[in-house]
Image (spheres, rainbow, N blue to C red):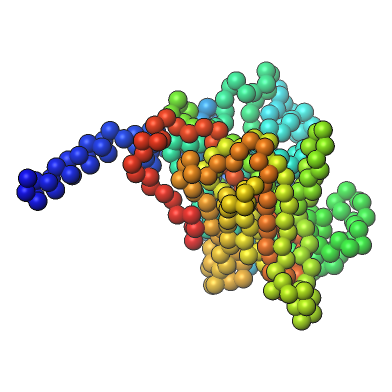
Amino acid sequence: MGFVSRGLLFLLVLFVLILSTPSSCGFGKTHKNVKSAVFLSPKFELGPGSVMNRFFYGLDFPRGHIAIKSFYAELVDEAGKPVPLHETYMHHWVVARYYRPKHHSHRNHSDIFLSRNNGVCQNKINGQYFGLGSETRGTATEIPDPFGIVVGDPAEVPEGYEEKWFFNIHAIDTRGVVDKRGCTECWCDLYNVTKDEYGNPLKSDYKGGLLCCYDDTHCKLREGFEGPKRSLYLRYTFKWVDWDKFVVPLKVYIIDATDTFRKSKIPEHDCQIEYQVEPCSTGNKDGNGCVDVKRTSFPMKNGGYVIYGVAHQHRGGIGATLYGQDGRVICSSRPRYGKGKEAGNEAGYIVGMSTCYPRPGSVKIMDGETLTIESNYSNNPGHAGVMGLVYLLLAEQLPPHSSRSLFYMNVNSVHD
């Protein structure tokens, strides 16, 4: 057989193999009917130095039994123009699911209850399904086929209730403030706050964080500075597919570096959400290279195959890593800092986090496996109110025929 004939035969065999291999990144069924919709949060107003940290219930959300493929959000003004972080800092936004009675009074939220994710933190802590901060514009959220976060299943909704969603949006207007970094880290002295929003006195060693920049607080402005209030929205984009038998459901887990896990008959997690990073010692005598390392370990009751992972950190962050019991890296996510002035590239701010998309089946967390999360921050200078979270999407099982996969369109593990 000549060279040309052998080449044609090889291409023919390859073509037949490709056709006989299930599609969707190498296996399963490709969902071609991905739907997309863009919504706006309720309008809110911010003036120079002001803070908005509110809950918006009953979000516009796709109806029915669906599988979410992506959730993207960014802050915009009334004209739909993206607002840069050096004008209004997006501390965080989170999206959570809840159930409410069908005959619910819209002014009363006492009769609703949270349908939280599968994470390990206690009570309602870190119970959201989606959430990011300043990095929102530059962080990938797409979920590869045939996986999806399944919601809207009528069988999961308690009788007499309906499924709804809410936003928690925390934004800080830093136009004209005396110290932008201090305002975005919620330094208590800049907000002239000594009590939390419920009137409880703050501890003497609490320098800054969520307890000092609650809704309607104000950060100190430069003397004589005046500026107009402006109307803002969080614009969010959904991508989803209708539920069918080819969708492989994912579970959402949020791992927190502040978790002070205590082993007992009933395991106790105590996630603090935020923590303080003390300044580097004079002359770097401790020899740590001016890097603050926050680390905690705990057993993961229910494991699964890792499909997606990303960390959430604040300014000063240099990356977070989740390790398995044998020391292997399950996901390492690093921040990207901006270098300009335009929205999405603001100098000195985290404008994106690298994401983990391991080949499905290649990274598995075993049931009961002890995981370790490590969150690293530069502590030159120190920082207040920082976070060290890792979001994970896990599949309990892989789709059929995954072992026959010849080709897999692997999404880059580092998204810049």
- As drawn, which residue projects farthest toward the left? 2
Which x, y percent locates residue 273? 75, 51
Which x, y percent locates residue 352? 55, 60
Residue in front for this viewpoint, 79 or 291? 291
Residue 204 horizontal side relative to residue 271, left or right: right
- Residue 130 vs 179, above or below: the answer is above
- Residue 146 vs 260, above or below: the answer is above
Residue in front for this viewpoint, 180 or 296? 296
- As drawn, which residue projects farthest toward the bottom? 283
- Residue 259 vs 313, above or below: the answer is above
Residue 70 horizontal side relative to residue 177, left or right: left
State the residue at coordinates (52%, 27%).
Answer: 65
Which x, y percent locates residue 132? 62, 52
Residue in front for this viewpoint, 139 or 325? 325
State the residue at coordinates (65%, 47%).
Answer: 325
- Work out whether residue 164 can be spotted: yes
- As drawn, which residue projects farthest toward the top? 159
Residue in front for this viewpoint, 225 or 255? 255
Residue 227 horizontal side relative to residue 196, left or right: left
Callout count: 0
State the residue at coordinates (64%, 32%).
Answer: 164
What is the quadrant of residue 219 in the picture? bottom right
Which x, y percent locates residue 126? 71, 44
- Work out whether residue 55 can be spotted: no
State the residue at coordinates (77%, 58%).
Answer: 275
- Residue 324 vs 189, above or below: the answer is above
What is the quadrant of residue 321 in the picture? bottom right
Residue 405 horizontal side relative to residue 211, left or right: left
Name the image quarter holding the N terminus: top left
